[in-house]
Amino acid sequence: MSKRTPVKRTEQDDEEHPSEHTGDGEHPSDRGDSGSPTDEQPSDPGVETGAESVVAGLENAGVEYMFGVTGGAIMPVYDALYEHEQITHITMAHEQGAAHAADAYGIVSGRPGVCMATSGPGATNLVTGIADANMDSDPLVALTGQVPRDFVGNDAFQETDTIGVTKPVTKYNIFSDDETTVGDDIGTAWALANEGRQGPTLVDLPKDVTQAETDSQPAEPSTPDSYDPPTAAEDVMVAAAAETLAAAERPLVLAGGGVIKGEATEELKTVAREHEIPVVTTMPGTGAFPQTDPLSQGIAGMHGTGYANLAISNCDVMLAVGTRFDDRLTGDIATFAPDAEIIHIDIDPAEISKNVEADYPLVGDAGVVMKQLLRAMPGTPPAETWREQCQAWQEEYPLDYEAPEDEPLKPEYIVESFDEVTPDDTIVAAGVGQHQMWAWQYWTFTEPRTWVTSHGLGTMGYAVPAAVGAKLAAPDREVVAFDGDGSFLMTAQELTVAAREDLDITIVVLNNEAVGMVRQWQDGFYGGRHMASEYSWAPQFDKVAEAFGAKGLRAETYEGLDATIQEARGYDGPAVIDAVIDPTENVYPMVPSGGDNARFALNADQLEGL
Amino acid sequence: MSRGELPGPAPEDRMQPEGRRNSQGIRIDPETEAEHPPERAVLSALVTHEPGVLAEISGLFSRRQFNIESLTVGPTVDDSLARMTIVIEEPRPGVDQAKKQLEKRIPVISVRELDTDAVQRELVIVKVNGDHPDQVNAITDMYNGQTLDAGPRTVTVELTGNQQKIDDAIDAYRQFGIRELVRTGYAALARGEAPTAQVSQPNQAPTDAQVATEEISDD
Ligand SMILES: Cc1ncc(C[n+]2csc(CCOP(=O)(O)OP(=O)(O)O)c2C)c(N)n1
């Protein structure tokens, strides 16, 4: 299989994975050839081993893709996959890439992505991606091989206490120690990742369990009886919240990632539009409300827009939906919406009053509770002056930049150029750093599940594998990833997967020859001492791309930029643009960490003065 | 000079809100409001009786920096369930948060914070120097304790009670020289008809069967 050119997917492969897969749990195996019953399909033998039970459990859940890297302890499961055509396994270069790809698949499709690795180093390599999913409540199932049960605890070859290591970063994990129930454990893990507040789960699979003989067919995926996520909020509290919101003079909606995860964007639009309430989104909430809507008040937090942060600081009632009030959003808690009564809708009771006290805690499903709230609204807030104020802030604090032709490329310009020529439902992935902030600030997001990045953990290296997972989840949509040179260097090897799988994605490395975000902090807070933040040498990323089997392009000047963008987009397969940008460009506005949101800095002097 | 600078009024020229929040995110009047003082809370949690649950719960408390005073765990009448009694010291919002974080873990079936009048007991075993056995016995009697082992050099006694009683007793034994001691931490049940933490709805009265099997002792 050693090939220097990308292996093209065959016609037949394409038929097996119809892009119009409905995603409602229906098996894509219903691909009406002869309509013959299953007993005639030799590719679907009954369960004979624990490993086959694992695969049957995944099939029950309607899993289409898995992302992984094989190895000793997980080999029985891989072997069982050999015969099963419903599931396509994407062999990644590194387990971290497998976890991020599965994570992005989960974000875009709304259903758990599945990643798999062997014991020991395979499992520990997954951990970054699992922790990332945990911070962002992304639905993810991780399967790890483990040494045989008799060896556990003896420091056997490639033994790691995977359960112990991943307990703090999973919603649920289980050491699956019985071949007759191992398939059920897969279903439980899948269902728990999917239901309630989504999150990562892990099943640790000792090799002797997956090798053992069993004919036990796993049950359909289901959560334990004791798991009962709330749906509707208490009516009394809803009524009180509605009354307060209806009387607000300076109302604001703060939409978090939970609105998207909870499929509640329509309800959000109705609340905002029916009652003319401006909407600010958090970084994970980006796309929950169209940024083209007149009520959109932008993105909030450390590098959010000035007008969003001022709206947060000065509102008198905040309807916060599906947000956990992360410190990158709130800044100093003392000054976070300090005049506001807070109505907090969240499916996780533990998020209520964790960081910011909720005056009206509404525990439940975002969409259901917003409908309750809509029904209970006694009127519409008298907020005309406030809306004018919000509008005035938008005019006072625009995101803006200059792009003189004779200077190096501005990253903001590149982001906007892409946005202009791509369809609205384009998926934008990003790594972590300045480039991520520019992508976030300068792209106009209008749809949910189009912004795919690492929010809570801030994991450099997320973009390339995420683009792989995103494309497989949405094969008909365009995928553009903005990456930094530093982030790209962490996971660039996953390009080989994009090439092998012939994935039509575009990666733009906004190359400032530095880990720019750190350099910016050094300029702002460390006297300009650029310790370990500048690269004295780095490869040419277009050449790296070519070596991995992708199309490599360069952009160094404004002249020809549009043509390069079109060439990358037009290329049928993965393309990488090494875009050499102005290395002195910094990200503003900026609220220094722990600062007051209303006192965001617009330039270096203001940053120093804070 | 760095680039990327943006137009707009400077920080001091912007609309500024008047209020403030305290470190717990609660809106306050900075003139009058003090922070919540820490309080002692007894949480009872019914959990599935399987390996790793104790590690999961103790890990949860340590990584979220809840101040834990004691944690005990043991089986219940139902073999598949174990009961944990956790005593924490936290400001009220911290206690509430600890309960919710506990409830969120999948192996946790139910959690209840016990009232201050709950039946709470701790066991201590103290080994003191055996030079004055009669005096040691007198103190043991006074605290309704029992002598478990007495030899020429050491006397080992057992006491149960609430924290205050045990602290007092330990103080009293100090004069003989305490060689070693071990305390179990609290075990607790709600008083009377009130449920502790149950499989059914936390607020429901216990069924007759539960009352019969899970003897609620009152003292
Ligand atoms: C895995 C990881 N290591 C370190 C960091 C700390 N960090 C945050 S942003 C950043 C710079 C990122 O550089 P690059 O990817 O080149 O993006 P740029 O900021 O230059 O756009 C670093 C090192 C991180 N977030 N993640």
Image (tube, rainbow, N blue to C red):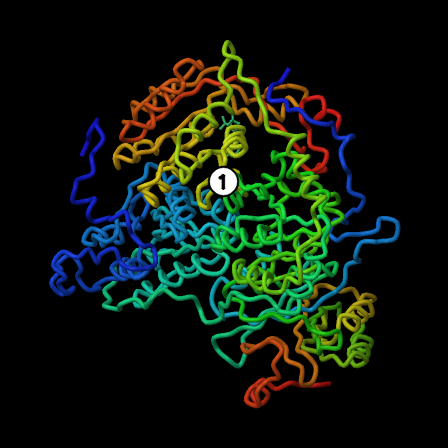
Where residue B135 appears, as percent x and y from the top left, is 82, 76
Where does the C terminus of chain A fall, quadrant-wise? top right
Residue type, numbered disc 1: Ser
Residue B175 found in image quarter: bottom right
Q: Is residue B170 in sight in this rendering?
A: yes
Comparing A316 with A427, the one in front is A316
Comparing A350 with A107, the one in front is A107
Where residue A505 appears, as percent x and y from the top left, is 34, 33
Tag 1 residue: A454
At a point 59% along the width and 28% down the height, the residue shown is A399
Q: Residue furthest right?
A: B31
A216 sits left or right of A386 in the view: left
Where does the N terminus of chain A fall, quadrant-wise? top left
Residue B71 found in image quarter: bottom right
Comparing B206 with A423, the one in front is A423
Q: Is residue B69 in sight in this rendering?
A: no
Check the image and report above or below for A63 versus A313.
below
